[in-house]
Amino acid sequence: MNQYTQDSRFTKLDPRTLTLDPAMQARDVELIKDKRLRSAQEIKQEAQDKAILEDLRNGVPIKQPIRVFVVNDIYIVVDGFHRTSACLKYLKENPDSDLMIDALVIKNRTYKEAFSAAQEANQAHGVGVTKDEEYQSKFRTLIVNGEFDLTVSQIRNKVGCSQGHASHIAHGLKACKEALASFAGGELINLNDFIEQLKEGLEQKYLLPNSAWDSKGFPKARPLADVFNGKDTTPDEDGDEWERTQIKNAANDMSRLVERYGEDFFREGLRKAVRGTDLGVKISQRGKWLEQVGSVKGDESFGVDDIESDGF
């Protein structure tokens, strides 16, 4: 905080003027593998949120100031997400209230600085994050800050993890660097756009299942490192769970291809891919399908493939 002293001041703010960005939160219970621990953390957080709101209803103000970074005139909450959220719920119940919240406001900041500060703050207090959440939070921070060329030793020192996990993070960062090549040197002015560009860049090169992404839209370090190194990200054991995972991943991959190419081009690509196979999948010709969905008249043609008599 010392580096921000010159631009900081304590004041009172209207909670309705503040921006709560879920992508900046370190809390991500979906990363907790143990279902009982995940459920316990969710219950703790829910109880804490209810307690804050109940205090407000009883006239008890928020005691600890929140921390806000001002980025391009936008007031972003970097510490105090749940306190601010409780205030907004209270104001929704009491729209005529003049409730204000104490805040440490730090001006002239960047999105990168706001993101890093939010990740660090969320690991320090409240309903403590688990190690899995902490490691992923620090992985996100390294990506946003563009620290792609760190050595494994440097990552171990920054993240506080094992040699093996640091190696996964190092490989994941290399994959992200390639995905963001067109963004290199650009100023981060919108976190959502940055995440979208990162995901698009990674999906152009790798087929990552939905389970390889966290709830904020960032890739998880281990699955990304595996595909970067050419490894299969699906379970290697046989049985019902393996089969369900394979089918789910296949469906997710197909859904992403539909989204990427659109229904028309995906369908025509699939028609050609299954032709001559024993899959038992038959897809009508493009012209017939377009006629059925009302895109063209029956006598319109879209090329040689549309008049093929291949039975598909």
Image (tube, helix red, strand yellow):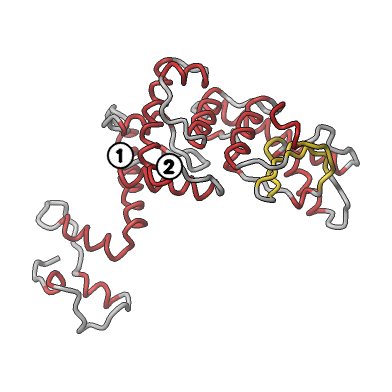
Residue 77, image x, y percentages: 69, 41
Asked if 254 appears above or below 43 in the picture, the reply is below
| Neighbour tally class for label 2: few under 14, some 14-19, many 20 plus, Cα within 10 Å | few
Which disc number belongs to residue 67?
A: none
Label 2 element class? loop
In percent of the image, x 34 and y 38: which residue is there? Answer: 245
Name the foreground residue: 87 vs 7. 7
Amino acid identity at mark 2: Ala
Going by the image, does 49 lie left or right of 155?
right
Labels 2 and 1: the sequence-earlier one:
2
Label 1 element class? helix
In percent of the image, x 46 and y 18: which residue is there? Answer: 154
Which disc number belongs to residue 184?
A: 2
Going by the image, does 56 lie left or right of 128?
right
Q: CA distance from mark 2 to mark 1?
A: 35 Å
Name the foreground residue: 34 vs 67. 67
Quarter of the image containing the C terminus? bottom left
Asked if 161 appears above or below 63 in the picture, the reply is above
| Neighbour tally class for label 1: few under 14, some 14-19, many 20 plus, Cα within 10 Å | some
Amino acid identity at mark 1: Gln
Name the foreground residue: 100 vs 193. 193
Going by the image, does 179 lie left or right of 83?
left
Check disc 1 and report the residue beneath it: 246
Give the mark count: 2
In percent of the image, x 28 and y 80: which residue is there? Answer: 296
Residue 193, image x, y percentages: 50, 50
Residue 140, image x, y percentages: 51, 34
Asked if 296 appears above or below 48 in the picture, the reply is below
In percent of the image, x 26 and y 83: which residue is there? Answer: 297
